[in-house]
Amino acid sequence: MTDQVSAWAERVTIPTYPIGAPDKNPMFLEKRVYQGSSGVVYPYPVIESVADAPVDQEWTAIFLENRYLIVMLLPELGGRMQMAQDKTNGYNFIYHNRVIKPALVGLAGPWISGGIEFNWPQHHRPNTYGPVHWSVDEAEDGSKTVWCAEVEIMFNTKATYGFRLHPDRAYLEIDVQLSNRTDVPQTFLWWANPAVHVNDDYQSIFPPDVTAVMDHGKRDVSTFPVATGTYYKIDYAPGTDISRYKNIPVPTSYMAYHSDFDFVGCYDHGAQAGMMHVANHHLVPGKKQWTWGNGDFGKAWDRQLTDEDGPYIELMCGAFTDNQPDFSWLMPGEAKRFTQTFMPYKAIGGAKNASQDAVINLELDETGDCAHIGVYVTRPRTVTVDLLYQDAVVWSRTLALDPATALSDTVTNLAATVHAHAPNLQSSIFNFQSTFTLRVTDDATELIRFSPLPDEDPHIPAPATPAKPPAEIATIEELFLNGLHLEQYRHATFTPEPYYEEALRRDPGDSRCNNALGLLLYRRGKFADAEPYFRRAIARLTLRNPNPYDGEPFYNLGLARMMQGKHDAAFDALYKATWNAAWQNPAFFQLARLAARAGRLDEALALITRALDGNRLHHQARHLRIALLRRLGRDADAAQEIETALELDPLEFGALWERHLSTGDATFAARAGTLLDTYVAIALDYAAAGLWDEAMALLDAAGVRAQEAGVRAQEDGQPPDPMLRYYRGWIQQMAGDDAGAAATFQQAAAQTPTPHFPNRLEAVRALEAAMAVNPEDALAPLLLGTFWYGHRRYDEAIACWARARELDPSVPTVHRNLGLAYVNKRSDLDAGLAAYEEAFALDPADARVFFELDQLRKKCNHPPAARLDALEQHAALVAQRDDLTIETISLLNWRGRHDEAFRRIMARHFHPWEGGEGKVTGQYVLTLVEQAKAHLDASKPHAAIDCLERAQVYPENLGEGKLHGAQENNIFYYLGQAHAALGEMEMARAIWERAATGLSEPSSAMFYNDQPPDMIFYQGLARRALGREDEARIIFNKLIDYGRVHMDDDVQIDYFAVSLPDFLVFDEDLQQRNQTHCHYMIALGHLGLGETDAAGAHFDAILALRADHLGAQIHRGLGD
């Protein structure tokens, strides 16, 4: 290929494991913890199944290629880069997964490994398995750019990012623009998530100033690259290089604490090739590695995510973030821009510094009296490579390099070389700790340099600490900052309201917390309730001065009034907000909308121009300016503004629609495709400015486009999202067409619910309008209740759903939603159970509702035998879901039907799912141990040994591998018993020694990999078998003492929890959970001491709280 760039799209066939349909039930998952922050997925529907076998599936792929690189992008899968190869050596510098094999670990379900995923506005990207918009541009310099864009529906922000390849350069630029399309501040993070192939020769290359790394939420810290302490429960003492994949046995994340360098990368020392990411560290500070680990657990995950491409690690690169979670703010109308560069490099042995121009390595070998030098360049050029000692050049080479040929050289006899080129240097002064510098220049222009850093004791930061309870916080300012932090970081289980409310209890007029609480209410659609808080904030701010330092409460007051239809009062408040520069641009934008809505188009044009004066990247403002120019007949000016808008964002759909309106251009339809939320977003922009005809035309185009493409939920061709018609009816009503609005609302009400759930603030007004016009509409209150619940307005949600049930009791989702609310928000288990029973009766094919119903029966402590009967009566539903299958297996084990449970386990291929960690493997081990015990009771020690040895090896169909350090004390205890039964006492004692070791300090067991008390109990039994009775009794008494001391603890959710699987459906009573755990410890302790009556009392107490408690059921029989 000559020095040019080719870009093309084609349909490619990739083996793909099909996914299930989106669940029709809204998933709220309010206390779900995901990557250290909130795992709320609403309004996205959730997909909960993946097929066991692949099919050949066609995907749209976009290729970019020059003489050095070829990359492939998949816009139908989140706009990810799927493959990137260095053509000069055939090295895939980005992991190329040749199969699409999802696992159910994404925010909304399916997630795939490999390539580069772009995680935004949080981790992992909610739409990572969905389509994005795309287009291809060519620049005058011959570069070509593939643009991708998405308006996400969780917070209604937009990302536009372009993959650019230059004709003569071996790197890929990614230009990113993140925009806030809403009227209020939003939080976000952006992590480019490249995967890379790994093996025993792999090393992550972090900058040399990275001496400490931190876990999610900065809750833990380790030295780097050599870890010397315990990290992720692995003791790396006295020192282990955790930059090497081969040295990390368990799933592990680490993120650089700080770096002043602009790069992070990796290197395969066997292939002598690697990947490098370069970006301005002031904007892109995040540097992270994630691995599943190289143990059995990690290898099982490799099998789940690929068929033949092997293990990988993720080497993430974060913009405006350095941790997960670590969110930044986007103000209304703001756009943040940055560039990330990915490139291969080779043959230099690693890296010490990197830029877009070059990657360099300098290794000083004091023992060998030499320096190893490596230089790689990203385009053909003649360079001079200098090695300096202090300020003197002691070695130099000038040579032609290109991306196919790197410099790798060794300067030998380094001390003599230094003296030869620096004759004034006294020999006593020279040492390897002095300043060497490697410098690369091109025509006297310095491209890059590196000097080894001083050998100093590294600064190791302290881990983060949890937020204190509000009552324990000393100052109102700190209460505000803690509440704001919880908002900004989207904390999963702690909410900001108690902090703001405590501050207002102490000082009811505090402007910060009044504004914050008002904004929370506004975000939740409670516009009238929000207004008094903004007024109180303004009253405090203007106590001594009518012109306050902060204009935000005026701006927010204007928004609240505007959404209540109080437009004149809103105009006054917004104009006052323009007195503060920080709020001028968004306020002028809203003022222009209000003026346009009132028909004052000239005034609106002047106002929107003011908005753009201070923010040329306010894309909605520019779109409104184009529309106003067109309405005023200034077509040439409008056309020029369209070109400007598309230069700033090639996928600015407001400008593309305006071009369509002016010229009939079809680009909008081609690029918008069937992503209907983009149509809605632009339509609502028009509606906010009173441009009713344009808004309705877009909504009509969305419906037509959906029908043409076959994207429909019903056979009659209705739009797949009923909100399209509700929005249209609302807009007709505002335009004065009451009859048309009523007819449209009737059409909307006739639709059936679909997995499209309202989330925009405008939806509140549209649905309330529909309910007022058509009181018999059952769909509108169902949808509005869903909005209210998703925005934590529970009483309003229950009221709406109750109205929907009264109007149409035949809709199962209404009953299911009410059941969820009754249980989680009113603690009314009886009402919740009745609602769930009705939902399932109305749709007995809904496996998700059946799963939730079974979980509720478990929560209500229904007899396990009755639950098992119900599960077996609905075997077809159980077969659809792994979680229902494992519940069935657990109950079979509870009933003592271990052989049947084992057959069920081995007959199914399980897919890991969130909340299922350790459940399948736990039942597998338990089943085999119980079978072994039965064999021992039947004097069949050989059969017992066979079961216990199988229990130590997890078959692939379980979908999960054994975690490094897994506690298997029970297996080894009974294995010792089996060998003892054969008279093999030396072997038995050796195995009991293994059973007697491990973590022996009792603790709470919140997470699946925490030490269960059973394993401590079997340590005691093993020590007894070894004749160490005193040690055994100490262990049993520890269990009793812990249970007694902690029985009445006030248990709180861990502030830094990264997963809470038991909270995914129903809230759990943490105190009851703790009491069950403590009773279990006490029972096991008494059992170990031979105090069977006391043990039995505590086992009975457990079963009274949790009838299906397997440990209690099994061990209660040991005392017989």
Image (cartoon, rainbow, N blue to C red):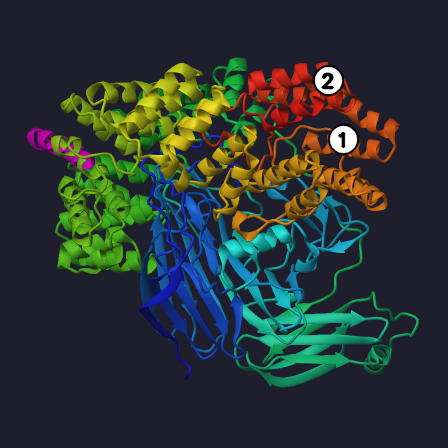
Position of 240 relative to 91 (above/below): above
Q: Are marks 1 and 2 in contact (CB under 8 Å)?
A: no
Is 7 in the magenta?
no
Position of 161 relative to 696 (above/below): below
Residue 1092, numbered label: 2
Is 741 in the magenta?
yes
Which residue type carries mark 2? Thr
Q: Is residue 1027 visible?
A: yes
Q: Which residues are magenta?
A: 726-744
659 relative to 961 in the view: left or right: left
Residue at 17%, 59% in the rendered image: 636
Residue at 40%, 25% in the rendered image: 792
Residue 1001, numbered label: 1
* Percent of width and height locating residue 713: 22, 43
Number of marks present in the image shown: 2
* Percent of width and height locating residue 258: 65, 50
Residue farthest to the right, as pictured:
428
Position of 898 relative to 137 (above/below): above
160 relative to 808 in the view: left or right: right
When asked about the image quadrant of residue 546, the answer is: top left
